[in-house]
């Protein structure tokens, strides 16, 4: 029986090491303003409506890898500029379940109002049910409420570091199964669900994955898409997943962003989770997201 002896209270001293690492970063073209000791920074000195030269883009990419989620204010992007910026990071995906913007299959449009409520208020990593999940996403605010509708991000590398050594040893080598069926599949009839399951069968990913660029390790399970841990009895698997998913809820591992029109967020899906607060109904909240295809977790 795998039981986690999670930290419950007191300082998480390892965060000071991360704080010092981030404080020691130096940039010439951009100005990051950190939002927490471990992740999140608003980036000043960048105009995304213009093509970024290679030097500036290299600094943006370095900030992205360091802070895991970065934000840009007052970026009145056209759809093509949004797509062009995202393409600098890799090939873009089409989402099979979410509504796309008219004429742009790679742009997902989240339009919420009195009749369409926000339901993204659970911690998750986008498309972890794919065999090759996303690298990251670029989200742009089109219309936001005056108050509410913030998004939170959790650093799953900090979540891994925060576990006691004995817990880390227990998690080594475990594999979890990710499946869209108990989320997107709930709104499908049996025939449609079977068709999509054939196209997107359950994916097997390590419970603890390694970042392909930084080499840092992170917890890679989430309550929306992770169905079970292989090799464990059902109740043991459920209890372990509950304990692991709780790690995203630790405020010391989080940052919170208040949206304004034309704000842009770029986050690393390989090592973070996010949670879109649903506290603005019946006001409107319209966002557009472009997602970059990533790599097979290991």
Image (spheres, rainbow, N blue to C red):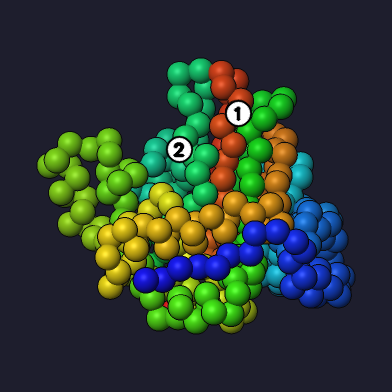
Q: Residues within 10 Å of mark 1 (few under 14, many from 20)?
A: some
| Quadrant position of the C terminus in the picture | bottom left
Task: Label 2: state its secondary structure.
Answer: strand
- Residue 109, how many percent across, how many down? 48, 37
Up the image or down, 84 lies above or below 146; here it is below
- Residue 68, how many percent across, how many down? 65, 63
Q: Does residue 55 appear in this view?
A: no
Quarter of the image for residue 66 reads bottom right
Give me the C-alpha separation between circle 1 and circle 2: 24 Å
Task: Label 1: state its secondary structure.
Answer: loop
Q: Residue at the location (39% across, 41% down)? A: 98
Q: Residue at the location (70% across, 59% down)? A: 9
Up the image or down, 50 lies above or below 75; here it is below
From the viewer's perspective, is the residue at label 1 or at label 2 nearer?
1
- Residue 69, how many percent across, how many down? 66, 58
Quarter of the image for residue 37 reads bottom right
Quarter of the image for residue 157 reads bottom right
Left or right: where 192 falls relative to 55: left
Which disc, if any, is residue 201? Answer: none
Residue position for label 2: 101
Number of numbered discs: 2
- Residue 239, how many percent across, how many down? 40, 58
Decide which of 173, 24 is in the foreground and name it: 173
Left or right: where 284 falls relative to 181: right
Residue position for label 1: 279
Badges 1 and 2: C-beta atoms under 8 Å apart? Answer: no
């Amino acid at each position: 029986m795998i039981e986690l002896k999670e930290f419950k209270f007191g300082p998480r001293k390892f965060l000071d090491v991360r704080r010092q690492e981030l404080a020691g970063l130096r940039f010439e073209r951009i100005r990051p303003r950190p939002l927490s000791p471990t992740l999140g920074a608003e980036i000043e000195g960048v105009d995304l409506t213009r093509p970024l030269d290679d030097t500036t883009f290299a600094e943006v990419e370095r900030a992205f890898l360091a802070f895991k989620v970065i934000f840009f204010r007052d970026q009145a992007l056209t759809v093509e500029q949004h797509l062009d910026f995202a393409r600098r990071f890799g090939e873009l995906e089409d989402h099979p379940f979410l509504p796309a913007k008219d004429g742009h299959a790679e742009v997902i449009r989240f339009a919420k109002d009195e009749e369409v409520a926000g339901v993204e208020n659970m911690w998750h990593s986008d498309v972890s049910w794919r065999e090759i999940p996303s690298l990251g996403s670029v989200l742009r605010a089109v219309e936001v409420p005056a108050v509410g509708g913030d998004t939170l991000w959790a650093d799953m590398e900090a979540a891994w570091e925060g576990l006691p050594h004995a817990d880390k040893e227990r998690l080594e080598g475990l594999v979890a199964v990710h499946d869209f069926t108990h989320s997107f599949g709930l709104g499908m009839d049996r025939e449609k669900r079977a068709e999509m399951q054939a196209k997107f069968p359950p994916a097997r990913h390590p419970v603890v994955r390694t970042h392909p660029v930084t080499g840092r390790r992170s917890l890679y399970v989430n309550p929306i898409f992770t169905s079970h841990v292989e090799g464990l009895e059902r109740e043991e698997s459920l209890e372990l997943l509950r304990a692991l998913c709780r790690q995203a809820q630790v405020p010391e591992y989080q940052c919170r962003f208040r949206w304004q029109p034309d704000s842009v967020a770029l986050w690393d899906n390989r090592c973070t989770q996010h949670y879109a607060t649903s506290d603005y109904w019946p006001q409107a909240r319209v966002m557009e997201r472009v997602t970059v295809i990533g790599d097979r977790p290991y």
